Amino acid sequence: MAQEDRRHSPLVIGLILLGVVSRLIPHPWNVTPLTAIALFGGTYLSKRWAILLPLAIVALSDLALGWHSTIPFTWGAFAAAGLLGWRLRSRPSPARIAASSLAGSTLFFIVTNFGVWATQTLYPKTAAGLWECYVAALPFFRNSLAGDLGYAAALFGMYALAGSLRLAPAGARAE
């Protein structure tokens, strides 16, 4: 294991646990921190973890939730969100984080609903059927967008706050 990976192991494990638990506990449809975790991992962890982190979360939680026909689409969309985090590495500003979160939500919506249309029998395999699938999924997109933006603000904000705190060494006296 690379030095950087060892140094970030507790963070990676914590993010995986947060992601898995968030998918298993009751929550509004599509309101999970997965896209935010993928963006965060892509930004601050090794490039390997940008892909492995979201895939580990969905693999572990899908073991409990069950396998489904859209797995390649959902897993791919979350891995792509990790790749979006790579773009944030150089300058992770609030505006760029928000834009990347919006891009991740939109990408997830487009890819996964295409997967629903392509692999299930809910909609006719026509352009009109694909459009119907996307329109029916708009309430889920609203939830994804709200969750992704909120969780991204929380994750990146807490990380920035933790980095800005300068704690006095143990035994130092306050003046």
Image: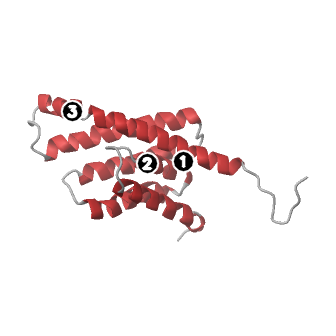
Q: Residues within 10 Å of mark 3 (few under 14, many from 20)?
A: few
Q: Residues within 10 Å of mark 1 (few under 14, many from 20)?
A: some
Q: Earlier in the sequence, mark 2 or mark 3?
A: 2
What colouring style does the render use? secondary structure
Picture residue at 88% right of the left edge, 55% below the top: 174
Q: Which residue is mark 1?
A: 155
Q: Residues within 10 Å of mark 2 (few under 14, many from 20)?
A: many
> Circle 2 is placed at which residue position?
33
SS of the residue under disc 3 = helix
- In the image, what residue type sits under mark 3? Ala
Instruction: Determine the residue positioned at 53% across, 58% down.
Output: 46
> How far apart are the two marked residues, 1 and 3, measured between alpha carbons?
30 Å
Image coords of residue 162 (percent x, y): 66, 51
In this rendering, does residue 88 appear at all? no
Does residue 11 appear to the left or right of 174 in the view shown? left
Is the Cβ of the residue at disc 1 closer than 8 Å to that at disc 2? Answer: yes
Amino acid type of the residue tagged 2 in the rendering: Pro
**Label 3, on which residue?**
136
